[in-house]
């Protein structure tokens, strides 16, 4: 019994991770339409209900930067060096495409869920 | 008083130093550490602003704990490090399995193991231990070399290009579904099995059924008194397989299990028969399987024929033993494959994540 629930828990965690992975990239790109540095970006995401730890955010930022979707710059602010990120022109183009795709998936998913609910009621 | 008690923020530097240790040295190491340090200090600043006072070392420690253990954070921040990536891994696993299970194990089981046993001078335990130890060392070396070669290939630019070079037209044809024992096959096995059993039961009274005209001057050696009954029992048991294939066709696992059990029992029996030959004296008195009748004992020609027949039987038995040993290995492998397939079939397939 406990084995089964542990396995189900693991399955849920893995599926949640997969679900979050794509969403996080989208959320980070969207937030970086405004220039931010790491901490303020994490805070903004957390305030909107999407917690992300340092070990996930910084590798993601580097990957997005390596893909040419972000540009970064070290700058001094409040007597401390901070690395500021913002969307690159390519990032803006890709973000628009991703948001379209997101809307399409969201609409389909809503439709599927409504159909499933209707089916369950019948 | 320690440095961190006087200045709790010094804990951050110590933490960053520990994280740095786990990140590969590169130009990015400083960059990553600086950015993580900035994030942590911003968290401390925000908390201090919220509380209206400076944080003590326990509160700073809490922030660092939440961030994660240095090794874990270092591993996450650093570039992904895979010895062998997902593209090459299936080929790596296949090659490793082929070399270790299909080449090395048979070599040690059928060639080097018997050689060690032959030179053991009765020290069987020592010979087996030596074979196992050599097999372990060779396996370890083979696995290390294969892993090293694949790790090098993984880092070569040709690898990525090779992954794209494939042609759907060159894929192997679809394999036919696993063939079950057909009723006709089972019936014929049953008929021949019963016939064989009857033949075996008639042998003691009618030795010409196996010796032919030589039954006039040859007779079975005492060894058959010991092994006759087990051979008859084994033959009778072999009838169970086709009988159950007919009666319970849904037991698709049974033929494989029965074949394996039958092969193991036959192998044991043949091994005892081969060993029985060793207990007899050599030369003219060497008659482990067939003996001359009293009337023929004085004929030099019959003595020669008896020696040739005994030697032929021994060679046949040794060859059968080797064949059966290979058969047992193959049958075991097939059974394990079948069990694994059944287990996999019961589990839902994971969705590929891109």
Image (spheres, coloured by chain):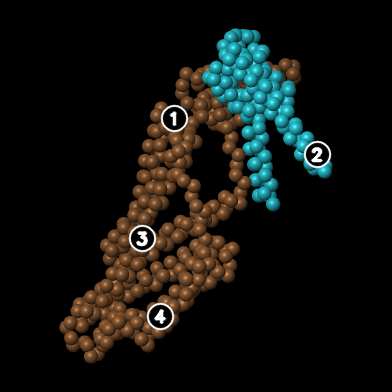
Chain colours: A cyan, B brown
Badge number at residue B160: 1
- What is the residue that sits farthest to the right in this orientation? A121
Q: Secondary structure at mark 2?
A: helix
Residue under label 2: A118
Check the residue under mark 2 and report the chain it is in. A
* Residue ID at (57%, 53%): B343
Instruction: Let me know if residue B333 appears in the view.
Output: yes
Mark 1 vs mark 2: in front: 2
- Where the N terminus of chain B falls, by quadrant? top right
Badge number at residue B200: 4
Check the residue under mark 4 and report the chain it is in. B
Callout count: 4
Answer few, some or many: residues within 10 Å of disc 4's Cα (few below 14, many 20 plus, some between 14 and 19). some
Check the residue under mark 3 and report the chain it is in. B
Nearest the eye: B121 or B86: B86
Q: CA distance from mark 4 to mark 1?
A: 64 Å
* Residue ID at (36%, 45%): B141
* Residue ID at (53%, 67%): B183
Provide residue B75's location: percent of width, then percent of height.
53, 30
Provide residue B201's location: percent of width, then percent of height.
42, 83
């Amino acid at each position: 019994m406990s084995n089964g629930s542990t396995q189900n828990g693991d399955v849920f965690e893995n599926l949640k991770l997969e679900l979050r992975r794509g969403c996080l990239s989208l959320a980070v790109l969207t937030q970086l339409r405004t220039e931010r540095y790491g901490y303020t970006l994490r805070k903004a995401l957390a305030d909107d209900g999407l917690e992300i730890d340092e070990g996930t955010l910084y590798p993601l930022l580097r990957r997005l930067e390596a893909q040419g979707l972000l540009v970064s710059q070290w700058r001094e602010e409040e007597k401390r060096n901070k690395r500021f990120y913002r969307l690159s022109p390519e990032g803006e183009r890709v973000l628009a495409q991703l948001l379209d795709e997101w809307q399409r998936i969201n609409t389909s998913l809503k439709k599927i869920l409504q159909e499933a609910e209707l089916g369950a009621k019948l | 008083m320690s440095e961190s008690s006087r200045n709790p923020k010094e804990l951050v530097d110590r933490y960053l130093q520990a994280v740095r240790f786990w990140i590969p040295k590169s130009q990015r190491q400083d960059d990553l550490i600086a950015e993580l340090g900035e994030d942590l200090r911003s968290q401390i600043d925000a908390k201090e602003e919220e509380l209206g006072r400076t944080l003590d070392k326990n509160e700073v420690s809490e922030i660092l704990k939440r961030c994660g253990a240095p090794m874990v954070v270092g591993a996450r921040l650093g570039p992904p490090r895979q010895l062998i990536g997902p593209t090459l891994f299936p080929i790596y696993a296949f090659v490793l399995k082929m070399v270790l299970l299909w080449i090395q194990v048979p070599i040690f089981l059928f060639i080097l193991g018997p050689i060690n046993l032959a030179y053991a001078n009765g020290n069987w335990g020592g010979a087996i231990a030596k074979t196992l130890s050599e097999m372990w060392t060779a396996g370890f070396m083979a696995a290390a070399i294969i892993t090293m070669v694949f790790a090098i290939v993984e880092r070569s630019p040709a690898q990525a290009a090779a992954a794209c070079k494939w042609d759907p037209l060159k894929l192997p044809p679809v394999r036919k579904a696993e063939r079950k024992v057909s009723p006709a096959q089972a019936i014929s096995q049953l008929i021949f099995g019963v016939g064989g059993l009857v033949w075996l039961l008639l042998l003691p009274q009618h030795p010409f059924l196996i010796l032919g005209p030589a039954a006039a001057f040859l007779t079975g050696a005492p060894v058959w008194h010991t092994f006759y009954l087990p051979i008859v029992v084994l033959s009778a048991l072999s009838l169970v397989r086709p009988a159950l294939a007919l009666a319970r066709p849904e037991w698709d696992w049974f033929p494989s299990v029965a074949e394996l059990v039958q092969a193991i029992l036959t192998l044991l029996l043949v091994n005892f028969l081969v060993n029985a030959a060793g207990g007899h004296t050599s030369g003219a008195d060497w008659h482990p399987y067939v003996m001359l009748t009293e009337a023929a004992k004085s004929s030099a020609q019959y003595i020669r024929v008896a020696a040739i027949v005994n030697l032929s039987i021994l060679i046949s038995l040794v060859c059968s033993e080797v064949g059966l040993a290979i058969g047992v290995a193959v049958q075991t492998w097939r059974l394990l494959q079948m069990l694994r397939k059944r287990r996999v079939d019961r589990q839902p397939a994971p969705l590929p994540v891109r």
